[in-house]
Amino acid sequence: MVIPEPGFYEAVEKAAAETYLKALTDVPADVRAALDSARRRETHPIGSRVLELVALNIQAADEHRILVCQDTGTPVYWAFIGSKLGVDGARLEDAIRRGVEAATRDHSLRSSICHPLSRENPQTNTGYRVPVVHFEFVAGADYLDLVMLPKGSGSENQSFLKMLSPADGVAGIKRFILESVVEAGPKGCPPYIVGVGLGGSADLCMVLAKRALLRPIGSRNEDPAVAALEAELLEAVNRLGIGPQGLGGMVTALAVHIEHAYTHISQNPVAVNIQCWRGLRAAARIYPDGRTEALAQWQLPGG
């Protein structure tokens, strides 16, 4: 077991701030490539024009070092902790919170987080139980991978869960996912990355749908049957005709990613969590001595 050095938690705070800002200002390379490919494939005149404007939006953000979109979202983090790293979970979570506050303060980010009843906004992008932090563990590693996924309300509002019966079969799974994308329509800023959770319990299924958004576009689930379903659904989603920004076209989604878990014999939960065309995410690796490495193309452990 490796005990982190005193500067480790300060490094986590800095990494939380830096990944938050990077996720808001820098479209990942795989998402850029997918958007470029979509622009070449799109034949609908309005859809094609929308994708040209998306490219100009990214170019402006790059040139002026500004946010790609004004919505700073709900800050969501995944902390993948190496099994050989002896971390204090409470200190780790507090460091991530301080990082969000620092990024919001130092870069004048819009604060999107408020109390659910009073709507009081502390202007820090933090609050009770926010940022959302998910903890997972990686066998054999002695470092921490911190992955940041801001979820704007346009896309997060397009979240769906249904407790299917096993009798609904694979056809029921497909139907619900396609119905969810149709319900989302233009509201989440397509072309989408469609995150799908399959199996588990109701709460785990929703987390899996969001976890699926961490994967690079073009990756496939390790289970061949699930991977085949991803490919089939992407083709089906792109036949819906919703198109870029919901104005028509052949590119409604850039990817469909499914994360799955075993489930109870008498249920089959399915969840959908939409991500907008920006595909926001950023990752960093923090070592026990506080050294930090930005991870341009981060992969889910085992992926």
Image (cartoon, helix red, strand yellow):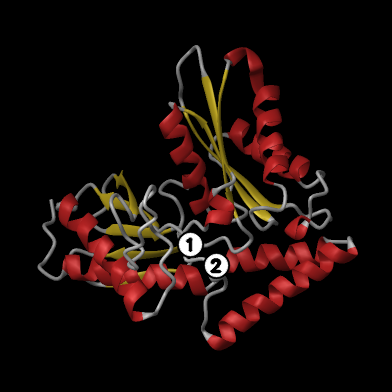
Q: Mark 1: few, some, or many residues within 10 Å (few <14, many ≥20)?
A: many
- Name the residue: 47% across, 37% down: 206
Percent x, y for residue 16?
32, 66
Who is closer to the viewer here, 41 or 2?
41
Residue positioned 76% across, 43% down in the render = 235
- What residue type is disc 1 on? Arg
Q: Point out the tag, 1 or 2, that comes first from the N-terminus.
A: 2
Residue 250, given in percent of the width and then of the height, sits at 83, 53
Quarter-of-image position of residue 105: bottom left
Q: Which image quadrant for residue 20?
A: bottom left
Left or right, residue 226 beside residue 140: right
Whether residue 136 is situated above or below residue 62 in the rendered picture: above
| Residue 2 visible in the displayed image | yes
Element under label 2? loop
Q: How far apart are marks 1 and 2 (CA)?
A: 7 Å
> Could you tell me if residue 231 is visible in this image?
no
- In the image, residue 55 sits, relative to residue 98, either above or below, namely below
Q: Quadrant of residue 121?
A: bottom left
The residue carrying mark 1 is 281
Q: Does the residue at mark 1 contact the one at mark 2 (Cβ under 8 Å)?
A: yes
The residue wearing badge 2 is: 28
Task: Judge by depth and name the residue closer to the eye, 152 or 233.
Answer: 152
Query: Which residue: 26% across, 48% down?
Result: 140
Residue 175 image position (x, y, % from top left): 71, 29
The amino acid type, in three-letter code, at marker 2 is: Pro
Disc number for residue 85 = none
Residue 213 location in percent, x, y?
52, 50
Label 2 CA crowd tier, 10 Å (few <14, some 14–19, many 20+): some
